[in-house]
Amino acid sequence: MKAGALVLLLAVSGLVILALVRQQTGTRGFLVGLGLAMLPVPALIVVFRLLGRVRPGRWRGQVFAFAWGACAAALIAIVANSFATRWIETATADRAHANTLGATVVAPIVEESAKAAAVLLVVLFRRRQIMGVVDAVVYAGVTAAGFAFTENILYLGNAFGTDRVEGLHGLGSVTLATFFVRAVMSPFAHPLFTCLTGAGFGLAVLRPERQRTRRVLLPLTGLLLAMALHATWNLSPSFGPDGFPLVYGTVMVPALALLAWLVLWHRHRDLRTVREELAPYVAGGWFVPLEPPALASARSRRIAAEWAAYHGDRHDVRIVRRYAATATTLALLRRQAAVDAAAGALAGAEFTRRERELLDALAEGRELARPALAYTWRIAPPRSHRHLPVPPAWNTPAPAYGYGYGGGPAPYGPYGTGNPYAADPPAPPDMPRPATDQT
């Protein structure tokens, strides 16, 4: 019911925004704007998909995020910005002042709040999809890419209309200048703003459940930073002819670099968590001793997927990647339980149920994934374990037990009386090496 209502809301928003943009740009302007606005979208989506490949989110969730940005958030922004700007113009009788306030005050507040709503909805109703900073930034970035797509249609369509009226073409074309600024120089602008909000949400979900104040203040801080950066960007034309390059070089690029560093650091931290938090499951036979280090290496994951592609098909590749993503989710789930336990909260029934789901999912893909991961040790072991010999067998029988937080029965590790999945897999075959040129 909720999903259906949300789809209906997005569909209606899309139709309304389509009509509004077409009304402002005209049919030809709309088509030109649509074609040009689509060009930077694939690159942005690929960047965020690659960024989140350690624990890739479902396509449906990211399609929702893009649709929310392109339809719902864009509609809210157009309606609210227009209303606020007209109200300011009526109150001050100064159109130029109203436009300046609309761009530097109203637009950042309205647009960033509308885009942030998508991440908030995912956190509230699809909590499993966001387990850290990387997940939240990916959803925020995809939402902003959708918003920028619709906004670019409007700007490029209007620029095309200006060219037709004034007879401009070639290097003097307003359309070309608009495309260069928005799609070539700064396609990352809206994603950068909203990713600051996403980082706030990601940091919030890493806090213990009992720290409710911090879990509220962190997203609000990220949102305020997004609004401030957005306002600074919109204010750059008022700084004179050098305003755009000045803000671009001294504010936007450093902010993008800092955000990229933060996200990559958290992704590396998530991989380290995989190696550390899966160790208790090794004792119970759910993983062999060298499997967590392999799963904690992005390179090993890629090689394992290549091995599956060579010896199987796309379905096998999906199994191997899903196995790695599920193992990552299990490690992050355990990390969150550790954070809650440090704050005095015991792991509850929801944790146990979720853990069982993930362990069952791992069992389904183990037959194919384990030989693929074993192959990575034969050609490219993780750097931290290169001094260790290649394991002769990928099974180490051990008693079934785990370690729990907060005392009482251990909520982690295999459940039941033993692990039925601890069978030796066949030795992984090699991929053929490229032949050496004979001259």
Image (cartoon, helix red, strand yellow):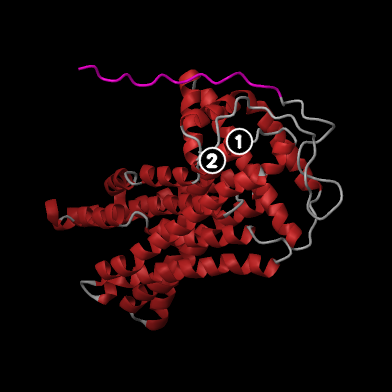
Q: Residue at left 41%, top 46%?
A: 47
Q: Position of residue 346 (x, y in %)?
A: 80, 55
Q: Position of residue 84 (x, y in %)?
A: 45, 71
Residue linked to disc 1: 290
Callout 1 environment at 10 Å: few (<14), some (14 to 19), or many (20+)?
Answer: many
Indicate which disc residue 385 carries: 2
Q: Which residues are magenta?
A: 423-439
Q: Nearer the viewer, residue 69 or 393?
A: 393
Where, by quadrant of the figure, is residue 393 drawn? top right
Q: Residue at left 62%, top 61%?
A: 204
On the rendered structure, is 133 left or right of 106?
A: right
Asked which secondary structure carries label 1, the reply is: loop
Q: Position of residue 105 (x, y in %)?
A: 43, 73
Q: Farthest residue toward the right?
A: 408
Up/down of 96 relative to 285, above or below: below
Callout 2 environment at 10 Å: few (<14), some (14 to 19), or many (20+)?
Answer: few
Q: Amino acid at mark 2?
A: His
